[in-house]
Image: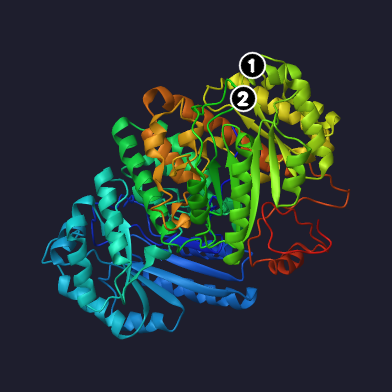
């Protein structure tokens, strides 16, 4: 199986923002809030220490967020915190913003006008009309519900033109009244709303679909800013938000709001005490890491709680996917490549291949319409990938496709390139010469030396074809046509991995992609053997440089999000075809439409989290265990590949390692870092794509 790269979003703990829980006390007892109300208020010293930690951020812009309970119960601490942060801003030459959450009961015009003097955004919690408020946000004490007061304070906020938004929290039962509740807020003059679904509550698939339809409708409403449409925080349960409680405990994530109902989650996302963290960058954590912690934790929950949290994750991923399809999170999430199933015929019968072979071949008209679909992407470059079966059995069709794609791409101001996957049997000088004239690359499937290759890659005619394959791959390596070797590792041959990599090196092959069989379980000892074999590469830098996996971020391979057009023009996520024999149920689950009806290929983008949810939902019980086993292997491999170079670094005596992540548009921060660390130079190791084209960097 090929490793097919993903453009996964990496959401990290925002080490420019820090939330402080000034008090756990509140005048309301909202049923969806499970904060422990017995915590004492935050001491002033803890607040000062938290602000000091915030200002260790490497960013020149920071945000201090006041949470509760109800933070306005400690108005004195808010004013002291803002005064101290303002002083630190001047000293550290940073721009500081503030976020204040409130239920609105204590928010009067005097406080609003005070806050308006500062760069403060006010998050005003209101769930809709009086009936909904009483149901979702009841008072802790007795007496009439102050709906009129809450609406007056909100309108004062709007009238004074403060920076604000309304946070509307809702249960599944509230979906039917969502429109009327939003209309009620709009009648009060509200134009900025954040929708927050109740976590810790079970959401059915039908309820999730209902919410997505509501989001879709709201996106079309003029003069209404739904903040979720610009959000990067889904799934909410895996958000790596930094929160410091009133007791000085640091949590990464939203588990603090589930403390009473899901104490195990609360413990899982506890980081440390405030005094143990000296620099905000220590709290940096990717959303993917949060998901791994969450996955482990969910397995330990009682079945009833597991069902709830799993539904919350599914809801979050569904919302995340919707937002991306709206094009508001990452406009660079283009689907700029398309796989073409040119034919289902092949001369080999590889035992790990799960493609259902037949005599089906793609008609030229379907190929052309598939290319037209690919060219609907917003990307200026496209990659057409010929697959099979063995695509070289349809050499004439491939040539027509290349000519058509180049012509159509040129007319749209785009650049087309091509990848041909092949078993190598039909590769010759004539084909190589043709492909060299076009922007093409060859993926040559070969598992290693003769013994390894012939154990799995069987020729249907029973002849010994290995010498022929070796001759053709050597011809390819000398031709100058770009290529790479795709080798498949199985539990049976994993012990020969390092030996086969050396074989490729000695044969003169210089670019290797390592894949692994994903339709059989990998026992723990085989996983460890895999890592042991890869570890041997550390002592051979030239060999390590040949391995593409260190840079292509392809693990877990099971979660490929590539799009493929079948011979009949139906379009799928590629697992539908490449895993069909093992997982026939994926064909229905992964179907997205037909090349004749699909109008925008970018709308088909899914990240690995969404693919994971899709597979886990639809895999039958017999295959789900193997699926999860392979995901575990993929994560182990991803960790190895990601950390290989940082462990392999060689430092001189006067050099010390300092690892920090820089993001796009933040390279100027290196000057501040050099000054802060009192050093005279920094060496950068860039992982992933770089938008620069420096002449000294090749």
Query: Mark 2 or mark 1, which has the lower sequence index?
Result: 2
The disc at residue 347 is: 2
Categorize mark 2 by other alpha carbons within 10 Å: few (<14), some (14-19), many (20+): some
Quarter of the image for the N terminus: give it. top right
- The residue to which callout 1 is attached is 461
In the picture, residue 512 is in which quadrant? top right
Q: Position of residue 163 (x, y in %)?
A: 39, 78
Q: Is residue 42 left or right of residue 62?
A: left
Helix, strand or loop under label 2: loop
Front-lying residue, 18 or 240: 240
With respect to residue 253, does 554 lie above or below? above
In the current view of this chain or complex, which residue is farthest to the left?
144
Quadrant position of the C terminus in the picture: bottom right
633 lies left or right of 301: right
Residue at position x 76%, y 67% in the image: 675
The image quarter containing residue 524 is: top right
Residue positioned 65% across, 28% down in the render: 488
Q: Between residues 85 and 395, which one lies in front from this camera angle?
A: 395
Residue 270 in view here:
no
Q: Are marks 2 and 1 in contact (CB under 8 Å)?
A: yes
Instruction: Please identify the quarter of the rendering in which residue 691 is found.
Output: bottom right
Q: Residue furthest top?
A: 462
Q: Confirm whether residue 360 shows in the render.
A: yes
> How far apart are the alpha carbons under marks 2 and 1?
8 Å
Instruction: Report the label total.
Output: 2
């Amino acid at each position: 199986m090929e490793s097919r790269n993903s453009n996964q979003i990496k959401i990290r703990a925002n080490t420019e923002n820090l939330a402080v829980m000034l008090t756990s006390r509140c005048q309301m007892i909202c049923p969806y809030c499970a904060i422990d109300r017995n915590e004492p208020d935050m001491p002033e010293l803890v607040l000062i220490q938290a602000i000091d930690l915030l200002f260790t951020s490497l960013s020149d812009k920071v945000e201090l967020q006041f949470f509760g309970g109800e933070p306005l119960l400690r108005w004195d601490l808010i004013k002291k915190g803002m005064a101290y942060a303002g002083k630190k801003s001047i000293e550290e030459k940073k721009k500081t913003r503030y976020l204040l959450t409130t239920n609105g009961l204590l928010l009067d015009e005097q406080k609003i006008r005070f806050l308006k003097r500062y760069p403060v955004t006010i998050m005003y919690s209101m769930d809709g009309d009086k009936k909904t408020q009483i149901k979702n946000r009841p008072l802790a004490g007795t007496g009439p519900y102050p709906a009129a007061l809450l609406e007056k304070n909100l309108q004062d906020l709007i009238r004074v033109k403060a920076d604000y938004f309304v946070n509307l929290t809702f249960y599944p039962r509230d979906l039917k009244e969502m429109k009327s509740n939003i209309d009620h807020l709009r009648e009060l003059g509200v134009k900025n709303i954040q929708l927050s679904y109740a976590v810790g509550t079970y959401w059915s698939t039908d309820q999730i679909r209902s919410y997505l339809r509501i989001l879709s409708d709201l996106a079309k409403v003029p003069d209404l800013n739904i903040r979720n449409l610009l959000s990067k925080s889904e799934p909410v349960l895996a958000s790596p938000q930094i929160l410091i409680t009133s007791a000085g405990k640091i949590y990464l994530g939203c588990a603090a709001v589930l403390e009473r109902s899901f104490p195990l989650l609360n413990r899982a996302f506890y980081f440390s005490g405030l005094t143990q963290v000296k620099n905000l960058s220590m709290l940096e954590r990717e959303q993917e890491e949060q998901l791994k912690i969450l996955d482990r934790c969910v397995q330990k929950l009682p079945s009833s709680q597991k069902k709830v949290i799993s539904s919350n994750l599914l809801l979050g991923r569904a919302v995340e996917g919707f937002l991306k399809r709206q094009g508001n999170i990452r406009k660079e999430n283009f689907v700029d490549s398309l796989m073409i199933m040119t034919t289902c015929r092949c001369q080999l019968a590889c035992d790990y291949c799960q493609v259902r072979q037949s005599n089906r071949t793609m008609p030229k008209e379907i190929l052309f319409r598939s290319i037209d679909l690919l060219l609907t992407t917003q990307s200026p470059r496209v990659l057409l990938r010929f697959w099979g079966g063995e695509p070289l059995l349809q050499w004439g069709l491939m040539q027509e496709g290349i000519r058509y794609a180049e012509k159509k791409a040129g007319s749209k101001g785009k650049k087309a390139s091509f990848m041909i996957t092949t078993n190598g049997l039909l590769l010759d000088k004539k084909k190589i010469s043709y492909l060299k004239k076009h922007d093409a690359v060859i993926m040559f499937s070969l598992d290693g030396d003769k013994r390894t290759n012939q154990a799995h890659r069987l020729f249907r005619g029973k002849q010994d074809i290995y010498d022929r394959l070796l001759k053709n791959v050597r011809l390819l390596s000398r031709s100058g046509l770009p290529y790479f070797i795709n080798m498949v590792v199985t539990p049976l041959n994993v012990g020969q991995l390092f030996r086969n990599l050396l074989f490729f090196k000695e044969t003169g092959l210089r670019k290797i992609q390592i894949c692994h069989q994903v339709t059989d379980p990998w026992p723990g000892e085989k996983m460890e053997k895999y890592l042991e074999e890869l570890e041997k590469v550390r002592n051979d830098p030239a060999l390590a440089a040949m391995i593409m996996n260190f840079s292509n971020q392809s693990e877990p391979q099971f979660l490929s999000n590539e799009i493929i057009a079948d011979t009949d023009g139906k379009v799928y996520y590629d697992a539908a075809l490449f895993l069909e024999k093992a997982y026939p149920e994926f064909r229905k689950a992964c179907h997205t439409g037909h090349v004749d009806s699909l109008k925008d290929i970018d709308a088909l983008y899914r990240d690995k989290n969404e693919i994971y949810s899709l597979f886990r939902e639809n895999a039958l019980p017999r295959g789900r265990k193997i699926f999860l086993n392979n995901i575990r292997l993929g994560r182990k491999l991803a960790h190895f590949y990601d950390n290989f170079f940082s462990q392999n670094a060689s430092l001189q005596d006067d050099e010390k390692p300092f690892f920090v992540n820089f993001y796009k548009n933040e390279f100027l921060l290196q000057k501040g870092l050099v000054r802060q660390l009192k050093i005279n130079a920094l060496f950068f190791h860039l992982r992933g794509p770089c938008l620069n084209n420096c002449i000294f960097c090749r």
